[in-house]
């Protein structure tokens, strides 16, 4: 019996316009009535996730910042912070890369130096609390993650500059233009395991959906792992199942209904 459903946001639960399907609210309510917890696991900031699910935030679990900040009913369940000195080093490297803008992701806020309009338009999709500073290396806050917005494409450009740090840190390609760096022990899978233990939920009782490389460990901590139809080839390879429909076809919700977890009809 499924007790916990965890879905990535961008490229998974949301369509390419970053919109949530209107049927979600009724489906989540019905799941809740059957004591099935719905959670989102994202590279997005907690405050951004909370604002997207304001009306049901008191019953959801938020795995924010790639699992470094987990919140349930307004309480922190788990925080995995990053060494601030290492974060500052990664910021300095990012400054020297062409077409790359660093973001310092902290518990209190996200911080940026660049005020380029294209960059700000993109980054505000994922960070609701955002502060401008003159020097990211002078910020004093609990660091969760360093994100690089790479307009040339992470796998083609910035990833090579950080690959050497993979033995000591988690370096994850989160999307085509986003590279996320966290503490070595930080990822969505570790965070989900912590919550499973806390709530006495087993991997056999967990259903997850993901599409990109920062979802890899998450897929390995659930018996029922579904790569989206539109997922990265590596995620498809390690997942047990693949959705019949992609994120633009309401694939997550349609799969939940096809599995018979609840008895509702959903729009195509």
Image (spheres, grey):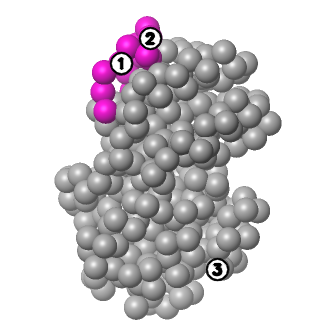
Task: State the residue in front, 29 or 184.
Answer: 184
Residue occupied by mark 2: 135
Q: Around disc 2, counting alpha carbons within 10 Å, would you say few (fewer than 14), some (14 to 19), or many (20 or more)?
A: few
Estimate how packed mark 1 is, as few (under 14), some (14 to 19) or many (20 or more) residues with alpha carbons within 10 Å: some
Residue farthest to the top?
134
Q: CA distance from mark 3 to mark 1?
A: 42 Å
Q: Indicate the position of residue 2 as horizontal and vertical percent values.
A: 41, 85
Q: Secondary structure at mark 3?
A: loop
Q: Position of residue 109 (x, y in %)?
A: 34, 30
**Residue drawn 49% across the image and 15% down it:** 113
Distance (Cα) linking label 2 and label 3: 44 Å
Q: Are marks 2 and 3 in contact (CB under 8 Å)?
A: no
Disc with the residue nearer the chain's start (3 vs 1): 1
**Residue 136, placed above or below residue 159:** above
Work out whether mark 2 precedes mark 3 in sequence or the reverse, and give the earlier one: 2
Considering the image in quadrants, where does the N terminus appear? Answer: bottom left
Rendered image quadrant of residue 215: bottom right
Q: CA distance from mark 2 to mark 1?
A: 7 Å
| Residue drawn 40% across the image and 37% down it | 82
What's the magenta region?
130-142
Who is closer to the viewer here, 81 or 134? 81
Q: Which residue is mark 3?
A: 240
Q: Which residue is mark 1?
A: 139
Q: Residues within 10 Å of mark 3 (few under 14, many from 20)?
A: some
Res 28 → quadrant: bottom left
Residue at x 64% of width, y 45% of height:
173
For the residues labelled 2 and 1, say whether their Cβ atoms are less than 8 Å apart: yes
Visible residue check, residue 12: no
């Amino acid at each position: 019996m499924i007790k916990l459903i965890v879905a990535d946001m961008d490229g998974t639960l949301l369509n390419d316009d970053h919109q949530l399907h209107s049927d979600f609210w009724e489906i989540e309510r019905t799941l809740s009535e059957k004591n099935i917890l719905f959670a989102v696991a994202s590279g997005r900031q907690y405050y951004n996730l909370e604002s997207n699910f304001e009306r049901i935030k008191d019953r959801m679990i938020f795995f924010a910042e790639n699992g470094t900040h987990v919140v349930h009913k307004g309480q922190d369940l788990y925080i995995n912070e990053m060494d601030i000195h290492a974060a500052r080093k990664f910021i300095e490297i990012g400054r020297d890369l062409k077409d790359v803008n660093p973001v310092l992701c902290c518990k209190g806020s996200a911080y940026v130096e660049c005020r380029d309009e294209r960059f700000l338009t993109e980054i505000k999709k994922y960070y609701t609390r955002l502060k401008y500073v003159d020097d990211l290396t002078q910020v004093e806050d609990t660091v969760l993650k360093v994100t690089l917005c790479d307009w040339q494409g992470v796998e083609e450009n910035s990833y090579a500059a950080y690959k050497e740090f993979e033995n000591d840190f988690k370096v994850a390609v989160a999307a085509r233009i986003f590279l996320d760096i966290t503490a070595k022990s930080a990822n969505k899978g570790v965070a989900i395991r912590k919550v499973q233990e806390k709530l006495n939920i087993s991997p056999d009782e967990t259903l997850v959906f993901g599409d990109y490389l920062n979802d890899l460990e998450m897929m390995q901590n659930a018996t029922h792992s579904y790569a989206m139809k539109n997922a990265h080839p590596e995620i498809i390879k390690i997942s047990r199942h693949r959705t019949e429909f992609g994120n633009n076809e309401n694939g997550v919700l349609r799969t939940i209904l096809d599995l018979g977890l609840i008895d509702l009809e959903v729009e195509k």
